[in-house]
Image (cartoon, rainbow, N blue to C red):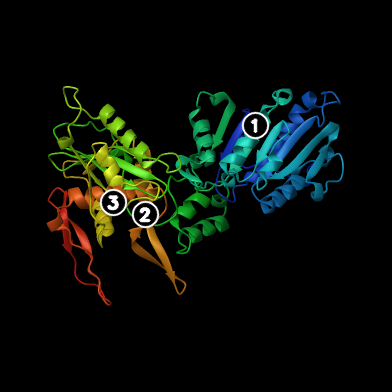
Amino acid sequence: MSRILYNPYPHQQAIHDSLVKRKYIMQPIRSGKDICLVNDNTKFVIETMPIWSARPDTMSPKLNIWFVAETYELLSQLWRDVLAYTPRELLAGEPKFGNLEIPIINGGRYKFRSAKNESYLVAEGLDRLNVTEAGELPQTAWDLLQSRLSSPDRLELASMFADGTPRGQVDPQNPTKDHWFWAEVKAARGGNGQAESWYWFEDRHNYGGLEHPILSLTVEGQVELNRKRNDPNFSERKFREDYLGECLPVVLGDPAIEGFNRVMHVRPVQFSARYRLHRTWDFGRNYPVVIWHQVTGDNVWHVLYSLVGMKANLLDEELAARVIEITSRNFRNGDGSELSQNQIVDDGDFEATHKEDSRMESTVEMLKSKGITLRVTPTRWGDEEVAINHLNGRMKIRSNGDPNIIIDPCNDLLIRCFEGAWVYETSTIKGYEYRKDKIAEIQPWIDIFDAMKYFITRVLVPGDLQIMRHETRKQTARVRVKVDADGTPIGYEETQWAN
């Protein structure tokens, strides 16, 4: 018998009842993920014992199972859970945390590994892999662990259980990619051609309509949920991730753009040679960005395409070649001919006028040699706030139900920005956090914002309508978007002075 009696909740029982070999469990805190992991592992050991115990003695260990966590603190807790819930009859000796192993009867073995040292995640084939708080592991560690399940002599049993609290859809080491755990959950959720061998569990509707699978069952738990929901020091995002188990597509922070709706603002956009094609360039430190835009006759902003590169593998010359190729392939006249230079307008970062040490010409000069005339003007004080206000104004829907901005679905990273990756920068003064009227400099999101900003301040908003942000020592002038009767942004007006 186990040392602690385990009576699974319905959502845990559903996981145990699944017969698939790979289970990705993305759930909120306090939902019993690790206890579920340990008992699902025990179920696996007992049910497969006739297979692995019959293996030859030369195969050592006959059953090889790893428990993996990112930190030793998590690993220590997992060790305690395994000892607390594993039936005594399965243990073949007295476990010692010093060697991070637990012997199992009939020649089996549990090993505990921290992903902090990736050199410990190699060299052994596994029958089962158990990973706690998988969202904390880097992609490199996960790739190593995945390969442990492909040993030819253990493929018959090879299975995996990975649990974790959602930590966002974006890879923190490379924001242009999905987080590997979210990517695996998406693949499992959508089947990905392997629906019979994958399992996912992150939709809270599976909790029988409860907000939280365990806390919602008691008065004390409901009090905790409400307290965290209303705690001013506990952000809405953190509450939704930790207590509702939602894997959100954005970075932490206060979103700068409100009112974005995928259904309304994201749809296929057709290029029209009747209107000028605009390209805006930002040569970010690590992520150069180019965005293709058009404005229709009725002042609807179409975002047609975007390119986000990495400086490590995309030099400015290569970026220019890519832009020329993309433009030629995707944007042509009705008769199939290429656009003339008069049909394309390029605006960009003033930094492009500077010469780099590695070459004798500036980026502007290099682009000109390739037939691209880049208009550059220094960023002015207040441009960023003007751009934020304009984007928020563009979120408004016209009286006829049409949006003021339409973004083609191919612009995945840009859509993430509108969904919350553009957050306000904050600063802390004497223990209090203050929000600044500017986008936090988190790459590549700030680089994408700058490319959008150039289009707003140099194309969409005429110079005589731009009201700059004026500052004195004691007072600040605020600006707000002016819209016409249909809600279309047409300029800005200055509000009253604020002390």
User: Which residue is identified by label 2?
Assistant: 255
Say what amino acid the circle numbered 1 marks: Ser
| Residue sticking out furthest to the front | 360
Q: Secondary structure at mark 3?
A: helix
Q: Secondary structure at mark 1?
A: helix
Instruction: Between label 2 and label 1, give the one nearer the viewer.
Output: 1
Whichever of labels 2 and 3 marks the residue nearer the N terminus, that label is: 2
Q: Residue at x 79, y 43 (%)?
A: 101
User: Which residue is identified by label 1?
Assistant: 147
Say what amino acid the circle numbered 3 marks: Thr
User: Which residue is identified by label 3?
Assistant: 353
Residue 271 percent location from the top left of the image = 21, 32
Residue 26 percent location from the top left of the image = 55, 42
Q: Residue at x 53, y 39 (%)?
A: 180
Q: Residues within 10 Å of mark 1 (few under 14, many from 20)?
A: some
CA separation in Å, label 1 and label 3:
48 Å
In the rendered view, does 262 fall on the left or right side of 6?
Answer: left
In the rendered view, does 129 fall on the left or right side of 404?
Answer: right
Q: Residues within 10 Å of mark 2 (few under 14, many from 20)?
A: some
Relative depth, front residue between 273 and 232: 273
Tell me, yes or no, whether the two marked residues, 2 and 3, touch with CB atoms within 8 Å: no
Instruction: Between label 1 and label 3, give the one nearer the viewer.
Output: 3
Q: Secondary structure at mark 2?
A: loop
Residue 366 percent location from the top left of the image = 29, 42
Residue 225 percent location from the top left of the image = 51, 56
The numbered disc on residue 58 is: none
The count of marks equals 3
Tell me, yes or no, whether the two marked residues, 1 and 3, touch with CB atoms within 8 Å: no
